[in-house]
Image: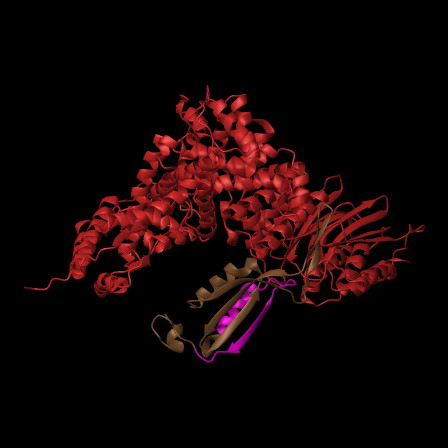
Chain colours: A brown, B red
Amino acid sequence: MKLVTAIVKPHRIDDVKDALREIGVSGLTTTDVEGFGRQRGHTEVYRGAEYQVDFVPKVKVEIVVDDGDVDGVVDAIVKAARTGKIGDGKLWVGEVERVMRIRTGEMGPDALSG
Amino acid sequence: MSVSDPAADLREQLRALERAYTIGHHGPGAARRRAGLVDACLVDLFERAGAPAGVAILAIGGYGRMVQLPASDIDLLVVHDDDAAIGATVDALLYPLWDAGLAVGHAVRTPAECLAATERFDAWTAMLDGRLVAGDETLAERALAPVRARAREDPVGFARRLRDAADARRGRFGSSAHLLEPDLKEGSGGLRDVASLGWLATALGTDLESAGVVRARERAAVDAGAAFLVRARSAVQLLTGRRADRLVTELQPDVAREMGFIDEPGLLATDGLMRSLFEHARNVEHVAGLALARATAGTTRDPVVIADPGAILEALADAAEGGEVLSVGLLDAIEDVRIPDRVDWDARTRAAFLRLLRAGRSGAGMFDVLDRVGLLARFMPAWAGVRCRPQRDPYHRSTVDAHLVAAAARMAELLTASGDAGDPIELAAVAQVERPDAMLLGALLHDVGKIGAGGHVPIGVAIARDTLEAMGVAGPVRDLAVFLVEEHLLLPDTATRRDLSDEDLLLDIAARVGTPERLGALYLLAKADAFATGPAAWTPWRETLVRELVAKVQRVFDRGEMGEELAARLAERTERLRQLLDGEPEEQIDRFILRVPRSYLLAVDPARAAEHFRIVMPSLGRNEVRTMSSEGSRAGTYEVVVVASDRPGLLSWIAGALAIGGISILAAQAFTTEDRTAIDVFEVEGAFEPEITEARWRAFRNTLRRTIEGSISLEHRVREKGRHYPRPRTPSPVTIRVLNDVSEFSTVIEVGASDRIGLLHDITRTFADLHLGVHLAKVATFDGRVVDAFYVRDELGRKVTEHSLLSGVESALRERLEP
């Protein structure tokens, strides 16, 4: 099993959710996050008042998937999150050692399905 | 003889009592019977222990008050006279109860220890509820009398401690009067507040009515409230089987059903339960708060005369501004005023109402008072719809009306600059507020449409308009207040759900908002609204996004890219375009208007745009080129529009193909739609003969198509063609200006040069070579000189900020354009 983590622009999250639902992903976790990558913090100006914006708001999406589903999930997220402009985000995939459904105690892929 | 077990019997009796009423109907009567059953058992157990002399068994706390709830502890105080054998007596009482599985809380004290225990406030108040159940009556009195006497020594000091304890509970548990998951015991307006009134009476040594701290009407309201709270809390305990006090969301449907609430139109059973609960808890909170305030401040019962509704508001506004406690006399007078079901507003009423709003938090307290005495809905009939109404979403913690009053109070704080000094946008927005009353009224009414009838914003707008009209609020103040109600979600919703790097989105928002003052007003309302909602509604994450939106829309205003006049023009042109397209499928028209940039709608005549619709809308092949020509604005000129999939260099190819085709460009406007279709509009004339024949158009289209397909090199041909024609004899100098502060998203490059064949091609080709996309272009020719403005972006769609690239653009253009 793999953990797919993606950092995407806030306004793309609905499209990402729809794209994942379409390929049958039944559960995911999202978190409002702030950070920076190449799209650094910057200075904003409003009516002459300057203020520093250190972190850029993004949404983090996390999904645990069976090994065979990774490519489809990655593809769906990337397609849905891409605008072609700077700040579209990052995605990474990591190994997951163990998964359990807390209610039933089901382990592994059983804990992911349904 | 069978050995009976009184504790086991008690357990059975308590179970029978549980079954005797349905879960939702264990009120004060059941609580009293429960206490009575425990009393009888303790008497029995005490007898069996030999009824030793010098011992008194006292009920304290809720049990002492005869309010024993299903899962609450049985609170006992065993008083003895320094009896060495008291341990055995206590064991004989407690073990059977414990063995029967009953929860017992107990203390064993001598009279002196009882007095010493008053050092702990909760132990003190529990003993104030003390009553003898079994044993030595004199001893019991010896223990309890000094405990009571201590409270009576300094009733004001005692009342102050009760008030401090109530404040601490409010801080820790919140209020049962509007929190959506209230704590029925410890929350403000909960059962602890009811008990406080009893302790206060003990300290005053008389009933609260005689002492002048509670009025008869208030007492009746508290009694009804206490009964309801006991029923609700008992239901929670019976449903969970635990000593639970919080009415959490998951339990609310079951408690509602058990207490006999049913779904009604516009009000679910759960909401009906919560509404009733809030009504009762509000009464308790209100009366307990007033009683403690009066007892500590020592207000008078001096009669006050109030003549009419306006005078009520004036009296409350005076009290709010002066931070006064409302006296019994004043509240009596308020309730004695004959008030029509609907108050007619006059200038005085309106002025006093606005003073209350401006008074911020202390004014909000007066709104609570008005609400508790049933008057707020007479001043504002619409208030009845939101009163005590729970909200079902993950953010809100309070009822709609409490949220509205809190938002208005927060707005008053923001306007007096006591808000967040670290927020530069807030400070700048406050500084430009011209109509503070509109801001306060907008905050007070922003959610007034939440009446359980669907989309709250349009409903709220209608209600707000009626309410303001009834108040006699008119003109710009009314308009701004209604605007705030209508658009209060615009900034937070747009900021978190839409692409803030979309120029047209910003223009649309600017058009919808209209003026910088209104933009600032919406920002302040968003903050006040979020503050009144709960901690999850205004995280740094949301704040960053909302601020970004506000700053960007403000810059749209600053640059004059949108404003009231332009917004009106845009609306008018869009409407005209819709009329001209009448008969086309509605959703195609919507799609067209959404796809084209706002700059297109503002620049292109609606009649032309309606013609463009027909060649822009059908889906476009990758290498497809569509053109349409018509008569130009002057005799002998033509307008030609070229539609193709946008790509780097497209504009230069079109310009080159026109040049090769013997067509001179007089003016040009290049636009790119949201889905990257180029719509380039040219005003042209024949370079050699006045009429441009269909054959010439066809040749132009062929050249362009073959260039796009990559089968011919345009550059070479344009150069070849140019060589045959002389350059202007007195060339005017080439001027180039690179501007980075004209547009939010594009770098603007202005180029001036003498006109010649292939000039536009050369300029735009330079951009393509540097991987710059032309997002918008305005080309004009005056008297042999061309003045162009190009809005360019880099490959990632950004403004060009890299210094080397910017100077590179300039030198590359000079190299190509200077003779």
Magenta span includes B338: no
Residue B795 image point, x, y percent: 70, 63
Q: Quadrant of the C terminus of chain B?
A: bottom right
The residue positioned farthest toward the top in the image shown: B307
The residue positioned farthest toward the right in the image shown: B730
Residue B686 image point, x, y percent: 78, 48
Residue A111, placed above or below residue B796: below
The part of the image, by quadrant, that contains residue B288 is: top left
Residue B662 image point, x, y percent: 78, 53
Left or right: where does residue B40 sit relative to residue B505? left
Left or right: where does residue B355 sit relative to residue B559? left
Residue B739, placed above or below residue B360: below
Q: Which residues make up the magenta segment?
A: A71-98
Q: Nearer the viewer, residue B811 or B24?
A: B24
Q: Quadrant of the N terminus of chain B?
A: bottom left
Q: Nearer the viewer, residue B555 or B806?
A: B555
The part of the image, by quadrant, that contains residue A60 is: bottom right
Residue at 67% across, 36% down: B565
Q: Nearer the viewer, residue B546 or B226?
A: B226
Residue B41, placed above or below residue B95: above
Left or right: where does residue B301 sit relative to residue B473? left
Q: Visible in this render: residue B96?
A: yes
Q: Nearer the viewer, residue A39 or B678?
A: A39
Q: Visible in this render: residue B453?
A: no
Residue at 56% across, 32% down: B322
Give the total of numbered labels. Answer: 0
